[in-house]
Image: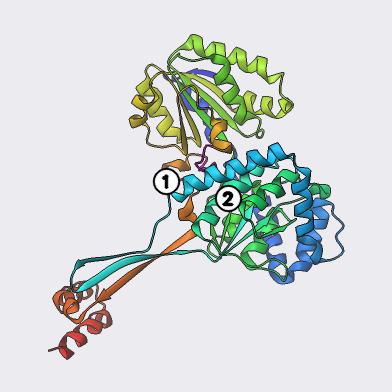
Amino acid sequence: MLFLDINDTDFDTRFAAILTRGEETSLQVTEVVQGIIKDIRSSGDDALLEYTNRFDRLGLADAAGLEISSAEIEAAMAAVPADDLAALQLAVERVARFHEKQKQQTWLSTEESDILLGQKVTPLNRVGIYVPGGKASYPSSVIMNAVPAKVAGVKEIIMVCPTPGNEINPAVLAAAKLAGVDRIFRVGGAQAVAALAYGTASIPKVDKITGPGNIYVATAKQLVFGQVGIDMIAGPSEILVINDGSGNPAHIAADLLSQAEHDELASSILITTDRGFGEKVVAEVERQLALLSRESIARASWDKFGAVIVAGSIEEAAAFSNRIAPEHLELAVADPFGLLPLIDNAGAIFMGHWTPEAAGDYLAGPNHTLPTGGTARFFSPLSVDDFVKKSSIISFSEQGLKRLGSRIVQIAGLEGLEAHARSVSLRLEDGK
């Protein structure tokens, strides 16, 4: 863990390791993933079955066993305590309500009497959502990916989720049922991404793939992009907390560890204007680490990629945050709304001392699938927009083309595209 002053002369050098963590995909990983994609494209279900049996130790006899049956889903629903189902249902409802506000409708403009312009909004036909399994098994990931697709009007949602040793968290299947997933397959890794992108006899080809995964999944999504759409290339999770010396150090420590427990590459950073407060947070982190069942993971993350930074002013802290463009940004200050105008780059912004990042992970409403690794500079959270496509609508009347046609011909001439110009000028001549 680093404890730094933002104005230290060696700050950038010492902080660089945190910024570049997980940045490199080794050539070996890329070659392995390319081989898997090639096998799925050429051998379909046979390759998918072989990889699934090998990596997840399933022993399935044929590809029919790759799909999780409705009976298995109903059994999972029955296995989840009623109070847990109620919590998941509340999350589905709140996430749906938030994403309903993002919906856009087809529109037409008649501002010009002789030209009609507009935009047609059409839901994607079929999407695939990837849900991690095994060590990382999160029903919240199901909700955050499936619900906006459902709200957008996607016709079919296909979910893939690895089940190592044939084990799956029943809450994951229950969340899928509550969120409106249509079909679920017990496959994961690069082979699942390839199957969704190219289709097999069992798994239908989709238009877009969303959802987080390990380095093999992320690499596969990158390689199939263009064949299908993807949401983003997600890297290790991260949190940045801006603090002005107010609040409870124990709360801030818990928030930092909420990301550190994800995996060893997660990054947890506090930037504060109060050195003494930062020292108290460090002590609290050490105390709370010993209480975690995932202590070894959280400690590895904190030791290698944790940081407490002392800034000279809250404005300096905000400028640093914009440079980092964090996935999760907590404004743990006395006046978070006063600080908000200074924030340009962040995946999600959590306001004040009573809004821990975990609230957004589960049921606040906004999506928790967020840009990582500084990509919040140009990417946004997963939304309804990710599950629709937009087509421009253009309709000229004869009068409209006559009114603007000479300018169209003029611009085509600037580009030396004679056929473009002629497609307009011939109409203008015919209309005389």
Check disc 2 and report its element: helix, strand or loop: helix
Q: Residue furthest left?
A: 432
In the picture, measured across the screen, residue 33 lies left or right of residue 246, that is right
Question: Measuring 63% from the left and 48% from the top, which residue is drawn there?
Answer: 142
Q: Quadrant of the C terminus?
A: bottom left
Check disc 1 and report its element: helix, strand or loop: loop
Q: Which residues are magenta?
A: 364-372
Overall secondary structure of the magenta stretch? Answer: loop
Q: Is residue 68 magenta?
A: no
Rendered view: 267 above or below 195: above
The quarter of the displayed image where residue 195 is located: bottom right
Q: Residue furthest top?
A: 276
Relative image position of residue 15 (x, y in whole percent): 51, 27
Q: Is residue 38 at all visible to an observer of this figure?
A: yes
**Which mark identifies residue 145?**
2
Nearer the observer, 305 or 205: 205
Nearer the observer, 119 or 24: 119
Nearer the observer, 18 or 154: 154
Rendered view: 113 above or below 432: above
Crowding around mark 1 (Cα neighbors within 10 Å: few <14, some 14 to 19, many 20+) is few
Relative image position of residue 278 (x, y in whole percent): 52, 14
Q: Quadrant of the N terminus?
A: top right
**Which mark identifies residue 378?**
1
Q: Amino acid at mark 1?
A: Phe
Rendered view: 358 above or below 198: above
Relative image position of residue 100 (x, y in whole percent): 46, 50
Q: Is residue 68 at all visible to an observer of this figure?
A: no
Q: Is residue 370 magenta?
A: yes
* 3D distance between C-alphas at marks 2 and 1: 20 Å
Discs 2, 1 touching: Cβ within 8 Å: no
Q: Amino acid at mark 2?
A: Asn
